[in-house]
Amino acid sequence: MNCPKCNSQKSVKNGCHLGRQRYKCKECGCQFTLSQPKGKPVETKCLAIILYVNGLSFRAIARIVKVSPKAVYDWVKSFGLESYEKPKPQGDIIVELNEMWHFINAKKNKLWIWKAYCRTTGQLIDWECGSRDSKTLTRMLNRLLKLKVSVFFADNWEVYAELIPAELLIQTKAETHGIERNNFRQRHWFGRFRRKTCIVSRCKQMVDITITMSLFARFRVNSNPEMILSFFN
């Protein structure tokens, strides 16, 4: 062990302090005790995140790993912020667009998740949370149009035709099976998105890029949950 003051490795036992072994540095005379590790082991945090992407609520996870729901929320939030970047597809980019209904706290407080699914790569490449209006879609389209998309497939919602050039847009539900399947998987794997559930989102941030959407895209669409382990090794 190293002395916290001079970093010397020459120390001897020197009694106890509050039931913990105390040491004295033979070089500088500093007396110290070994600091105890703080927080839960990284394995516990990893397990909590894996359980979250498998559909459990924060409270259910908290009961399993024996911590508070707030601790689970903080772990998932921190991991979501640090572990994801949206992929940038190359080549002939064909994008399916769709808007997915959600709510904050109560069903009267609607939140729409606009999603962009790349048919070429099978990846979820972008999303935007907000209202079911042109302003929200515009924010996502401004990013997508930089990718030189060959064609957009969407349903018949009128906002698409207002914002996407006619030569790039085909509106038919017959060509949006990929994004519809993606919506189904999202409702399956994350409890807060299920149509009949006791799990609710308390704020927009819980749904947006910082947490759930990034984890869904990263570990349920663009790769798999086992990849979580690589972030903790």
Image: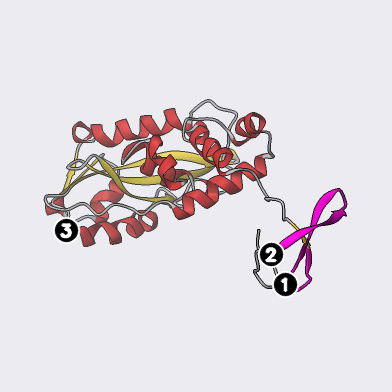
Please determine whether, in this image, residue 85 is positioned above or below residue 109: below
Residue that carries the numbered disc 1 in the rendered image: 27
Could you tell me residue 149's position as x and y percent? 17, 54
What label does residue 148 carry, if any? 3
| Gap in angstroms between the C-alphas marked 2 and 3 | 64 Å
Q: What amino acid is labelled 3 in the image?
A: Lys
Say if residue 144 shows up in the picture.
yes
Amino acid of disc 2: Lys
The residue most toward the top is: 196
The answer to whether residue 202 of the structure is visible from this angle is: no
Type of residue at label 1? Glu
First in residue order: circle 1 vs circle 2 = 2
Q: Which residue is mark 2?
A: 10
Please, what secondary structure does the residue beneath circle 1 have?
loop
* Region in magenta: 11-31
**Tag in front: 2 or 3:** 2
Q: CA distance from mark 1 to mark 2?
A: 7 Å
Residue shown at 64%/44% (left/top)? Answer: 40
Of callouts 2 and 3, which one flags the residue occurring earlier in the amino acid sequence? 2
Q: Is residue 20 magenta?
A: yes
The one nearer the camera, 112 or 149, is 149
Q: Residues within 10 Å of mark 1 (few under 14, many from 20)?
A: few
Q: Which mark is residue 232?
A: none
Q: Secondary structure at mark 3?
A: loop
